[in-house]
C-alpha cells in the first residue's frame, strides 16, 4: 500500500512537472541572422544562408527541433535581414535582432568582415554569437564567453596543411622562394601571419621574398602580379575572398602569366563561382583548400554530402546561388544548433554555449569532426587538406588531394605546365 501510494504521488508530480514544462514552452524558437544579397559577399553569404534554410525547413517539416528544457519539439522561426555586404548596416541589424526582435539564438552573416561588427554587439548584450564562418583569430579571447565558431577552423589554423607542405615537401620539389599576397582583413591577415611563422620556423628551408597586403576591395592585380614576378618566386600565395581570387586569376590569364606553384583559397571553397568567372583552364593546376563540399567525410549526424547536394539541387533548381563550401557551412551550423538544443539545460545563452562545447570531438558531420576550444570558443577541427585542381578528359574540374599524406589521392604537379 505504501509503495503504491508513493508511486502514485511520484506519477502525479512527474505529470505535473511535465505539464508545467509544456505550458512554459514557447510557441517557437526564434533564430536571427543576416545575409547579403548584394555587394562583395553576396554569393558566398547567400550560399551559407540557403544551406541553413535547408536544415531549418527540414526540422520544421518534422515538427520542429527537440528542446531538452521543455522536453518537446518546438518549431523554428527564422528572422533574417539583408545587410547588403555593408558592415554599418550589419551592425544596425544585429542590434535590431537582439533588442527589437528579441531572438533566442543569434547567427552571424558570412565571413570575418561581416562578423567583426557582431562580436562586440553580442558581447555587450550578453548574447551568444553563433559564428558560422567568421574565423578571424582576434574574435576568440578568454575574456569573451559569448562566441562560438561552428563551421570551419579559426583562420590561424586554416593554412596548417598548406604550410606544412611548403616547408616539408616544397624544398624537395625545388621550392625555396615564396611570395605572399593577402587581403588586409582579419581572415586573411591571420592566415598570412601563420604563413610567416611557418616559413620562419623552417630555418631557411624556404624564404619569403615578397610580402604585401592589399585592400579587400582590390579588383585589379596587374601591377601587383608584375611586382611579384620580378622577385622570381618558386611559389605564390594569394589570400583573398572570392572576388579577389577571380580578379587575380583573370589578370594572370590576361597577362599570359603562369606561376610555377600558385595557391588561392576560393577555387576550392566556391569552385562553381570561380569556374563560371575564370573558366576551367584558369583554375588548372592551382593549389587550394579541399573543402567539405568536395571531400566525402562519413557523417554520424545529418545528411551525407551526396544527399545534401541532391537536396540543394532540388530546393534551389534555378542555380542562382552556386553550391560550394559555404552551402555546407550553413547546414553544419544548423546541425550544431540541433545537438545543442537537444542537450542544453536551459535556453540561457551560456547554457547554450556549454551545450555546444559539449559536442566537441563527438559531433561528426559532412563538414568533418567538430572540435572547439572551451576557453575561447574557437573551432580547431574541420581542417581542410591541401589539393591541386586538374582537368579530367572532358575538361572538367577535379580535385587531387596532395597533403597530408594520409589523405592524399595523388601527387602534386610542379612546376605548373
Image: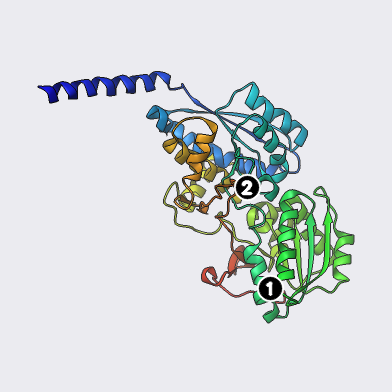
Q: Is residue 375 visible?
A: yes
Where residue 138 appears, as percent x and y from the top left, is 70, 48
* Quarter that holds the C terminus: bottom right
**Label 1 crowding class (10 Å Cα cut-off): few <14, some 14-19, many 20+?**
many
Q: Is residue 75 left or right of residue 146?
A: left
Q: Is residue 63 visible?
A: no
Q: Which mark is residue 142?
A: none
Between marks 2 and 1 in the image, the one whose residue lies nearer the viewer: 1
Where residue 254 appears, as percent x and y from the top left, is 83, 62
Instruction: Determine which quarter of the picture holds residue 125.
Output: top right
**Label 2 crowding class (10 Å Cα cut-off): few <14, some 14-19, many 20+?**
many
Q: Which residue is mark 1?
A: 167
Please state which of residues 74 and 145 is positioned toward the viewer in this rendering: 145
Query: Helix, strand, or loop for circle 1?
Result: helix
Instruction: Determine which quarter of the picture holds residue 68.
Output: top left
Please state which of residues 55 and 132 is positioned toward the viewer in this rendering: 132
* Quarter that holds the N terminus: top left
Q: Residue at point 19% right, 21% down?
A: 8
Q: Which residue is mark 2?
A: 322
Q: CA distance from mark 2 to mark 1?
A: 34 Å
Q: Residue at point 82% right, 60% down?
A: 251
Query: Helix, strand, or loop for circle 2?
Result: loop
Amino acid at each position: 500500500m505504501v509503495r503504491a501510494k508513493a508511486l502514485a504521488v511520484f506519477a502525479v508530480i512527474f505529470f505535473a512537472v511535465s505539464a508545467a514544462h509544456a505550458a512554459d514552452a514557447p510557441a517557437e524558437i526564434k533564430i536571427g541572422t543576416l545575409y547579403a544579397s548584394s555587394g562583395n559577399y553576396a554569393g558566398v553569404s547567400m550560399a551559407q544562408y540557403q544551406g541553413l534554410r535547408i536544415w531549418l525547413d527540414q526540422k520544421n517539416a518534422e515538427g520542429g527541433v527537440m528542446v531538452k528544457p521543455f522536453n518537446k519539439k518546438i518549431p523554428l522561426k527564422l528572422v533574417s535581414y539583408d545587410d547588403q555586404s555593408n558592415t554599418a548596416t550589419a551592425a544596425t541589424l544585429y542590434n535590431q535582432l537582439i533588442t527589437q526582435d528579441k531572438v533566442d539564438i543569434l547567427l552571424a552573416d558570412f565571413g570575418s568582415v561581416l562578423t567583426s561588427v557582431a562580436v562586440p554587439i553580442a558581447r555587450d548584450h550578453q548574447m551568444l554569437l553563433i559564428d558560422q564562418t567568421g574565423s578571424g583569430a582576434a574574435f576568440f579571447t578568454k575574456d569573451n564567453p559569448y562566441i562560438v565558431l561552428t563551421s570551419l577552423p579559426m583562420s590561424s589554423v586554416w593554412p596548417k596543411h598548406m604550410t606544412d607542405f611548403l616547408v616539408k615537401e616544397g624544398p624537395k620539389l625545388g621550392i625555396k622562394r615564396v611570395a605572399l599576397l593577402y587581403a588586409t582583413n582579419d581572415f586573411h591577415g591571420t592566415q598570412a601571419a601563420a604563413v610567416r611563422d611557418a616559413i620562419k620556423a623552417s630555418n631557411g628551408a624556404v624564404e619569403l621574398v615578397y610580402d604585401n597586403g592589399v585592400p579587400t576591395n582590390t579588383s585589379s592585380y596587374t601591377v601587383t602580379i608584375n611586382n611579384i614576378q620580378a622577385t622570381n618566386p618558386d611559389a605564390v600565395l594569394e589570400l583573398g575572398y572570392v572576388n579577389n581570387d577571380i580578379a587575380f586569376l583573370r589578370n594572370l590569364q590576361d597577362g599570359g602569366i603562369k606561376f610555377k606553384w600558385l595557391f588561392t583559397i576560393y577555387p576550392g571553397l566556391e569552385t562553381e563561382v570561380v569556374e563560371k568567372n575564370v573558366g576551367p583552364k584558369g583554375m588548372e593546376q592551382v593549389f587550394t583548400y579541399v573543402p567539405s563540399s568536395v571531400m566525402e567525410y562519413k557523417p554520424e549526424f545529418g545528411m551525407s554530402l551526396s544527399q545534401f547536394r541532391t537536396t540543394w539541387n532540388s530546393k534551389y533548381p534555378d542555380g542562382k546561388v552556386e553550391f560550394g563550401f559555404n552551402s555546407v557551412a550553413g547546414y553544419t551550423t544548423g546541425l550544431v544548433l540541433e545537438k545543442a538544443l537537444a542537450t542544453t539545460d536551459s535556453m540561457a545563452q551560456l547554457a547554450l554555449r556549454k551545450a555546444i562545447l559539449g559536442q566537441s570531438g563527438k559531433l561528426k558531420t559532412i563538414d568533418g569532426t567538430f572540435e572547439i576550444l572551451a576557453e575561447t570558443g574557437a573551432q580547431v577541427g574541420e581542417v581542410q587538406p591541401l589539393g591541386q585542381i586538374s582537368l579530367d578528359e572532358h575538361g572538367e574540374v577535379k580535385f587531387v588531394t596532395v597533403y597530408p599524406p594520409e589523405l592524399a589521392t595523388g601527387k602534386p604537379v610542379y612546376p605548373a605546365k
